[in-house]
Image (cartoon, helix red, strand yellow):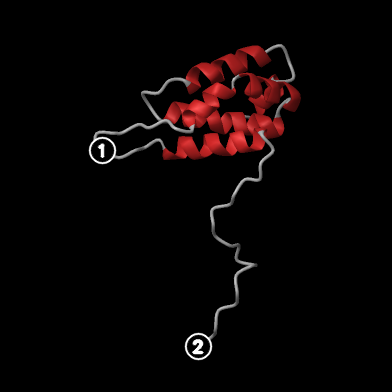
């Protein structure tokens, strides 16, 4: 992934992003969009932030579509939840919204347990 981040500073940027957006739209398998979202999130933090942000804002409709995407497997289980959550997280980052945590508290913020 570091090589991809380095590639965002070179002429390979457009090829990298084109592959990401194309693979993100492959909706027969939940792994392709999820992996693309993971790479996109990494590029937003480690790559050429200005260019990646501009690409994300230009293709926000793809990310928005993934927030409601559903994929039911043979066992009738919706396996697209990680994709929806990751897409919402990236959209919140792009819109500068605070990202809610998982609802749990960290161990340091938790009250001490009574000893027995």
C-alpha distance separating marks 1 and 2: 45 Å
The residue drawn where x is 38% and y is 27% is 29
Q: Residue at x 53, y 34 (%)?
A: 87
Q: Is residue 111 above or below residue 104?
A: below
Q: Residues within 10 Å of mark 1 (few under 14, many from 20)?
A: few
Instruction: Name the secondary structure under disc 1.
Output: loop
Q: Which residue is mark 2?
A: 116
The furthest residue to the left: 75
Disc nearer the start of the sequence (1/2):
1
Q: Mark 1 — residue?
A: 76
Tell me residue 14's x, y (percent). 65, 13
**In the shown orientation, is residue 90 left or right of residue 35?**
right
Percent across and percent down for residue 72 are 31, 33
* Number of numbered tags placed on the structure image: 2
**Near-viewer residue (65 or 53):** 65
Give the percent coordinates (x, y) of residue 24.
49, 23
């Amino acid at each position: 992934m570091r090589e991809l981040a380095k590639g965002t500073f070179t002429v390979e940027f457009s090829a990298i992003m084109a592959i990401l957006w194309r693979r993100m739209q492959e909706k027969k398998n939940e792994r392709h969009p999820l992996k693309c979202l993971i790479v996109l999130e990494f590029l937003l933090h480690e790559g050429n932030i200005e260019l990646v942000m501009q690409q994300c804002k230009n293709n926000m409709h793809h990310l928005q579509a993934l927030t409601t995407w559903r994929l039911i497997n043979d066992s009738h289980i919706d396996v697209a939840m990680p994709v929806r959550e990751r897409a919402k997280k990236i959209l919140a980052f792009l819109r500068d919204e605070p990202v809610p945590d998982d609802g749990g508290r960290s161990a340091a913020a938790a009250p001490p347990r009574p000893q027995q």
